[in-house]
Amino acid sequence: MASLTRRLADRIEASIRRRAPSGRPPLRIPARRVYILPSGTGALFGVLLLVMLAGATNYGNNLAFSLTFWLAAAALVSMHRAHRNLAGLELAGVRAEPVFAGETAIFDVELASRARPPRRGLYVSGGASETGTAVSAASDRNGYARIAKATHGRGRLVCPRLTISSRYPMGLFRCWSYATPEAHGLVYPAPIDRLGEPTSAGDTGDGHLDRSRRGEALFSGHRRFHSGDSRRRIDWKASARTDELMITEHSETQTPTHWFDYDTLTALAPEARLSQLAYWILAADRRGAVYGLRLPKHTLAPATGPAHRCACLEALALF
């Protein structure tokens, strides 16, 4: 009997999952995909109405009949209003910031409503549970919810199926619907140092330190203007303080370029190599160093800055 009940529940769940709105946002929740059942409070309220109806019938009290029917009408209006609170709601977008493996990923869910009455008392969760983030949406203001999901390994983290539910306005009925957006977050390898932070040519990923990259020109002083010097190099402010034209002089520095190579970390397991490379990339970025990344079938040229750091970490996450 238990197995039969379980199979029936699985079939119902699969049927609901197939009919739930899915795809890339925006996703609109149609009225036919909104499910509604009495809540615990609603069931107790229904029992109370039956008791009141039995008492009114027993005593023939017209005032008790009026009160019973008035409360029943209010419950019916509440059921209709609860259904309208979800029908036509739009899942406008889902975004997630990259995280490192082991951290908690946060999916930012945006809800929008084109109807004039605001949508109140909404709860968004990442599963069948009703507990989640409370949010409201209106035609002139979108609502935002945050869904947390634990991460265990690197790669793409798929957004869970979202459950959008509500007990608005009276809490007598629970309405809910599902949405499966095609959205994902990125999980970088956890930065773990096993070989020490590279500080010189011998400590880099492939034992190579390229010093052929030119750095920024540094100001080294002034000298007098000579025939043949470019007038663009004249420092007019410094010349105004003297009786002669002064030329600015600069000295160029050589910026070391670090290469982090996956194939040279033969002493580590594949996932440990990626964690070590992630650690070196973060360390080099903190120092403002110029670095490149070599992976099998993929090479990122030396550069620096937040965009380069994100590109290198993304390459490690999707390796």
Image: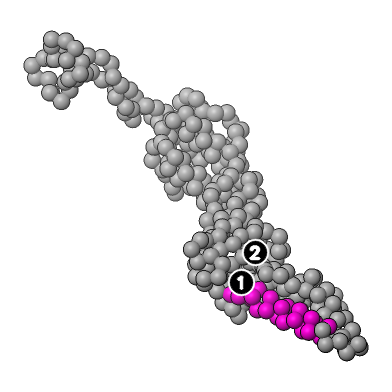
In this rendered view, identify the residue nearer to me: 64 or 111: 64
Task: Confirm whether the magenta stretch covers residue 242.
Answer: no
The answer to which of marks 2 and 1 sits earlier in the sequence is 1
In this rendered view, identify the residue nearer to me: 197 or 306: 306
- Majority secondary structure in the magenta region: helix
Q: Is residue 224 above or below residue 10?
A: above
Q: Which residue is mark 2?
A: 121
| Residue 270: quarter of image | top right
Residue 261 screen position, x and y as percent:
48, 38
| Residue 4 seen in the current view | no
| Residue 130: quarter of image | bottom right
Look at label 1 and name its amino acid: Asn
| Residue 141 seen in the current view | yes
Q: How is the image coloured?
A: one colour
Residue 34 screen position, x and y as percent:
63, 76
Q: Is residue 29 above or below residue 96?
A: below
Q: Which corner quadrant holds the N terminus? A: bottom right
Indicate which disc residue 85 carries: 1
State the CA–CA distance, disc 2 to disc 1: 9 Å
Q: Say which element carries label 2.
A: strand
Residue placed at 60% from the left, 55% from the top?
Answer: 146
Give the extent of the magenta segment: 64-87
Residue placed at 33% from the left, 27% from the top?
Answer: 215
Are the residues flagged by discs 2 and 1 in contact, CB closer than 8 Å?
yes
Residue 221 screen position, x and y as percent:
25, 14
